[in-house]
Image (cartoon, rainbow, N blue to C red):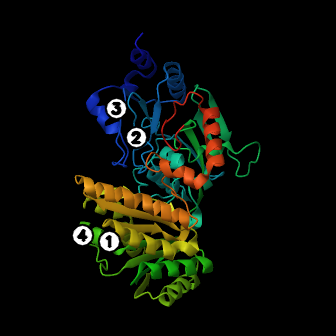
């Protein structure tokens, strides 16, 4: 029997081979990473179908490339020639919300925003909030260990994953963790799978911790005449209070957003800091205001009006969309130790000048996590080469400052070449051994994260 006919018996109408439809599954938002042509897209509806698909792929030595909503920006969901893209779009149910245990059980295709809304109806909260929360899936968030705007106080995806159901390359289903908040029985396989970008197992069910909804936040907006000054303000704030949000946008990002959607932003400022506090009283906000003024903040304003605060967050969340209107965007994602944040801002500006490339920087500044967005004309080969050089140099400088090549977006294909420099030979070899233990045939998302 033809292998695809065999697969059709497993998946029924969940198998897609129409080339026009396949086009939409070839890559994620890392448009610079070229996508190969899959032979099919598999859209299973259950764990048992995922198991059968994995067994089929192992028998036929066919690569499986798992995919959520395709919002990733590191090439982690980029298809390879001859692979089967495994889309979890049909596994999109919230299976349970346990209010007493303060947890949710979901399938990987559930959108982050859908869980937030369902939890909100029950007086609960799911904190991780990547900028794409409205359209990104929880499976994809788990695969990359996504962060977000509130992670400075409330943590990233891995801080909320209590347990997983996952399918190995040979079709074996296993469960890691569970519903208990504390569990140290055996190796922490849950944490190992979170952030593994689909290279170790196929996640089919996720148990997530929920929290009580926080009180309404007050918002502070400060502008600065230099990025370094904004970085100094952040360093002071982090040492002093537990802000629930600390975000920075540079002048290039501010101008792009204001051009895309006029919001009354100060487009002459070198940087804008958006900070929030959900602590009772005004002490935290006063402390943040003093830190901004001491660092040279030129305009510092505060509000407890939720709609005004949301307007500022809208500006931050629109940055990538607005910049994409100006050209092709390479999204860098580095993090440095907090004391190095002002210096990293300085180095990014120097890289932009040296490579004659536009770089707009937005940052989850309270975590030292920066997103330098390299904007260029994708039809110009010389501009393309300068953009790639800038992209790589940003990562090199982050490493030199004791940081990392990725804080939340993952390695995918775009950053694989620099991973060895960060990890070192011994660690990289251990990564390869772990990969082989989970996936001896190398069929799960090959070519991502590590090179073998």
Can residue 207 be seen here?
Answer: yes
Quadrant occupied by the N terminus: top left
Q: Earlier in the sequence, mark 4 or mark 1?
A: 1
| Label 4 secondary element | helix
Residue 353 percent across, percent down from the top left? 34, 71
Q: Is residue 185 above or below residue 266?
A: above
Residue that mark 1 sits on:
252
Residue that mark 4 sits on:
259
Q: Nearer the viewer, residue 295 or 389?
A: 389
| Label 1 secondary element | helix
Q: Earlier in the sequence, mark 4 or mark 2?
A: 2
Q: Earlier in the sequence, mark 3 or mark 4?
A: 3
Q: Is residue 129 above or below residue 61?
A: below
Residue that mark 2 sits on:
78
Calculate the distance from the C-alpha at mark 4 to the C-alpha at mark 2: 31 Å
Callout 3 crowding tier (Cα within 10 Å): few <14, some 14–19, many ≥20: many
Residue that mark 3 sits on:
37
Q: Earlier in the sequence, mark 1 or mark 2?
A: 2
Q: Quadrant of residue 270?
A: bottom left
Residue 297 percent across, percent down from the top left? 44, 87
Calculate the distance from the C-alpha at mark 1 to the C-alpha at mark 2: 29 Å
């Amino acid at each position: 029997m033809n292998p695809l006919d065999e697969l059709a018996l497993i998946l029924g109408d969940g198998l897609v081979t129409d080339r026009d439809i396949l086009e939409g599954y070839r890559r994620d938002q890392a448009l610079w990473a070229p996508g190969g042509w899959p032979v099919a897209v598999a859209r299973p509806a259950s764990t048992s179908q995922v198991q059968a698909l994995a067994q089929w792929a192992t028998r036929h030595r066919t690569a499986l490339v798992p995919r959520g909503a395709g919002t990733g920006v590191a090439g982690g969901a980029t298809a390879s020639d001859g692979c089967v893209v495994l889309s979890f779009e049909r596994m999109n149910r919230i299976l349970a919300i346990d209010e007493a245990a303060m947890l949710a059980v979901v399938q990987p295709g559930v959108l982050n925003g859908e869980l937030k809304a369902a939890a909100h109806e029950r007086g609960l909260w799911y904190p991780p909030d990547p900028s794409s929360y409205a359209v990104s899936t929880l499976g994809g968030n788990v695969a990359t260990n996504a962060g977000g705007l509130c992670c400075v106080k409330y943590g990233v995806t891995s801080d909320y994953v209590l347990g997983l159901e996952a399918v190995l390359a040979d079709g074996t289903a296993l469960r890691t963790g569970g519903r208990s908040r504390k569990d140290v029985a055996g190796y922490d396989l849950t944490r190992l799978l979170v952030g593994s970008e689909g290279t170790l197992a196929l996640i089919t069910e996720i148990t997530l911790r929920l929290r009580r909804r926080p009180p309404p936040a007050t918002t502070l907006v400060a502008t600065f005449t230099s990025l370094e000054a904004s970085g100094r303000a952040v360093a002071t704030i982090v040492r002093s209070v537990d802000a629930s949000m600390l975000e920075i946008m540079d002048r290039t990002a501010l101008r792009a957003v204001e051009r895309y959607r006029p919001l009354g932003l100060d487009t002459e400022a070198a940087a804008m800091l958006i900070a929030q506090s959900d602590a009772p009283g005004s002490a935290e906000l006063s402390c943040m205001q003093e830190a901004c003024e001491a660092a040279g903040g030129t305009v510092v304003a505060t509000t407890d009006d939720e709609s005004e605060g949301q307007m500022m967050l809208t500006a931050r969340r629109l940055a990538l969309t607005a910049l994409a209107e100006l050209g092709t965007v390479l999204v860098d994602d580095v993090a440095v130790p907090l004391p190095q944040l002002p210096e990293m801002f300085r180095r990014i500006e120097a890289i932009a000048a040296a490579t004659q490339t536009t770089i707009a920087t937005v940052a989850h500044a309270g975590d030292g996590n920066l997103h330098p967005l390299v904007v260029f004309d994708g039809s110009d080969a010389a501009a393309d080469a300068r953009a790639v050089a800038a992209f790589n140099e940003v990562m090199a400088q982050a490493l030199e400052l004791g940081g990392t090549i990725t804080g939340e977006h993952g390695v995918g294909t775009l950053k694989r070449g620099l991973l060895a420099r960060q990890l070192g030979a011994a660690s990289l070899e251990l990564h390869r051994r772990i990969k082989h233990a989970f996936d001896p045939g190398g069929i799960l998302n090959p070519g991502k994260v590590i090179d073998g």
